[in-house]
Amino acid sequence: MGGFELTGINHLALVCKDMDRTINFYRNVLGMPLTKTIELPNGRGKHYFFDCGGGDQLAFFWFPDGPDSVSAQEYRRITATPGTMNHVAFNVAPERIEACRERLLELGIECTEVVNHDDSPSGVSEDVSPSTFVRSIYFRDPDGTQLELAAWARELTSADVTYPAADAGALERANGG
């Protein structure tokens, strides 16, 4: 299937307005070790990497002459635009999701209630049910990037895939079968 033998995400690279503020938030608030720092040639900026667990890295560019951040309204529009990013979700242990929310609140970080994503018509439920597949908390970093702490509630199976519902063989073909 594809021939690439991918083993995960090496890194996801975002852009920040203030590298010191970014380091403080990701290292000191979220607890991600800073693992690599690169000064771009000719004073063009910086490229720093944080270990976000499981061998995956979250990286940030900082450009001294970069544009200002967009407004919240423009950000909502952009995150629905193909070729852009909507949010970054970090995996946490299911038994830690409630404690993670409490910790965010203790740190003064605005966040959502725990959202139980499920297979109901609304896609969410008040309580965890057998169809709940992930539990999430959403919040923003200092630059406004939407972040998520996510805890898998159950193992995903082939029954969770309905692409496309009208053609049972399409999934197998899409997955290289």
Image (tube, rainbow, N blue to C red):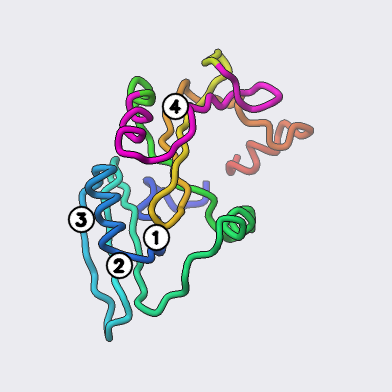
**Image position, residue 1 (x, y; %):** 52, 46
SS at mark 1 in the image = strand
Q: Which is nearer the eye, 18 or 7?
A: 18
Q: Residues within 10 Å of mark 2 (few under 14, many from 20)?
A: some
First in sequence: mark 3 vs mark 2: 3
Spot the residue most to the bottom: 42
Whole-Å distance between the Cαs marked 4 and 2?
A: 31 Å
Q: Quadrant of the C terminus?
A: top right
> Residue 34, relative to residue 19: is it above or below?
above
Whole-Å distance between the Cαs marked 3 and 2?
A: 11 Å
SS at mark 4 in the image = strand
Residue sitting at x 46%, y 54%: 144
Residue sitting at x 57%, y 57%: 75
Q: Which residues are magenta?
A: 99-126
> Residue 29, relative to residue 11: is it above or below?
above
Label total for image = 4
- The amino acid sitting under disc 4 is Trp
First in sequence: mark 3 vs mark 4: 3
What residue is shown with label 2?
Answer: 47
Residue sitting at x 46%, y 53%: 145
What residue is shown with label 3?
Answer: 35
Q: Please state if 48 lies on the left or on the right of 97 as rendered.
A: left
Q: Are marks 1 and 2 in contact (CB under 8 Å)?
A: yes
What residue is shown with label 1?
Answer: 13
Whole-Å distance between the Cαs marked 1 and 2?
A: 9 Å
SS at mark 2 in the image = strand
Spot the residue most to the right: 166
- The amino acid sitting under disc 1 is Ala
> Residue 65, relative to residue 151: is it above or below?
below
